[in-house]
Amino acid sequence: MDAHVAQLQMQYRNYILSLYQQGFLDDQFTELKSLQDDGSPDFVAEVLSLFFDDCVKLVGNMARALDQTGTVDFCQVGANVHQLKGSSSSVGAKRVKGLCINFKELCEAKNYEGCVRCLQQVDVEYKTLKAKLQDMFNLEKQIVQAGGIVPQVDIN
């Protein structure tokens, strides 16, 4: 095996492990990756693209709802949080899901300041995850372009 490919594969393995160790991803992401095959090589990228589009929409909806000074519809914000929690859970976005759990509790308590703070955290977190996954896809592309195969990473 080419030394460059081996180095890229090792870098990829270490990077994936770090995403799990740092709590960005959970086992559901592993399940998602397992659904990808030669017949659908872009499956994970497509699912994640839909997830991040959803994030933009839902975060925008929540921001607008929380911007209604004095008349915040916490039920509407909570419904958006619930939807984002479900989406993040289905793709294995562990940190985003965790924030959504806290955010939902803040909505139920009608804690405006807490909701605003949590919305900001969710916004930062999903954007951070998006950048990290883009780095992962770039590494995958480099491995394939160098003539290698993207390795399966055992996270257990």
Image (tube, rainbow, N blue to C red):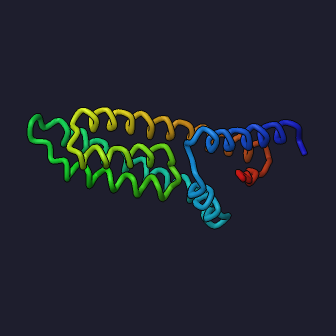
* Quarter of the figure with residue 69: top left
Q: Outermost residue toward the left? A: 70
Q: Eyeballing the image, is 7 above or below 34? A: above
- Depth order, front residue of 139/152: 152
* Quarter of the figure with residue 64: top left
Q: Is residue 31 left or right of residue 5?
A: left
Residue at 34% in and 33% down = 120
- Depth order, front residue of 22/130: 22
**Quarter the N terminus occupies:** top right
Q: Outermost residue toward the front? A: 109
Q: Is residue 75 left or right of residue 136?
A: left
Residue at 33% in and 55% down = 82
- Depth order, front residue of 128/143: 128
Q: Is residue 95 left or right of residue 14?
A: left
Q: Is residue 10 left or right of residue 42?
A: right
x, y (%) of residue 79?
26, 55
x, y (%) of residue 140?
68, 45
- Figure disc tally: 0
x, y (%) of residue 86?
40, 58
* Quarter of the figure with residue 32: bottom right
